[in-house]
Amino acid sequence: MIRIPKGILSVVLLVCFFMPLSRCQTYDLKAPGIVEEQRGSMLPDEPDERYLRSSEKPAYLYFIPSQNFDVRSWGSWLRLGMFTWPIPLLILSMVTRAFWARRVINAVELAAGGFSLYMLWLVVFLGETLFWGYITISVLIMYLLATSWELLVAIIETFRHSESDTPLKRDARLARAP
């Protein structure tokens, strides 16, 4: 029953991979106060007051996870994995019927979700958070809550069934039988 909301959250998380999550203001390297060293690097000097009072609009760098995806870069694959891990795990949990195998899948979902939430929290809230950044963090939190609920209900049902048919109760029933 909880698979449908988790499936919807997985698709929304996949859509977030292509959306801008946050942005940060950049500095114009041609602005006054930038000094070029002999080594060729650009280091900011004290900012010029004329530049700070400038009426020009600031430039922004947007964090879009799908942007500049490079097949040869492990960082790109890590970014992709932070948004796509729920889909294969959800399919695997639908196919798997064994109780303990599904609990292991739930544990992997919790670990992957926690890692993704931590990494995206750092990146999204490092700059100015945009609408899709809030959506991404909210989706991950809801997915983790749904997985935790699923795991908790399964554990409670396991203990309930194990307590209802203990060997002592079975022996007591057999002793009362005529």
Image (tube, grey):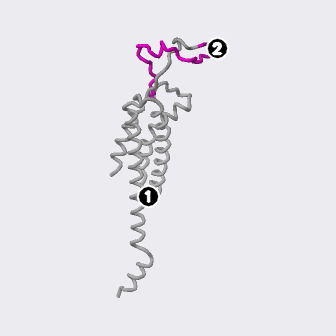
Work out whether 21 lies above or below 27.
below
* Highlighted magenta segment, given as a residue range: 35-64
Work out whether 176 lies above or below 122.
below
Tag shown at residue 173:
none
Residue type at numbered disc 1: Phe
Check the picture and name the quadrant holding the C terminus.
Answer: bottom left
Q: Residues within 10 Å of mark 2 (few under 14, many from 20)?
A: few
Q: Quadrant of residue 18?
A: top left
Nearer to us in this view, 43 or 63: 43
The residue under the point 40% across, 45% down is 143
Nearer to us in this view, 75 or 32: 32
Residue at mark 2: 37
Q: Which badge, 2 or 1, is on the more N-terminal residue?
A: 2
Can residue 94 be seen by looking at this rendering? no
Residue at mark 1: 99
Horizontal and vertical percent for residue 127? 46, 30
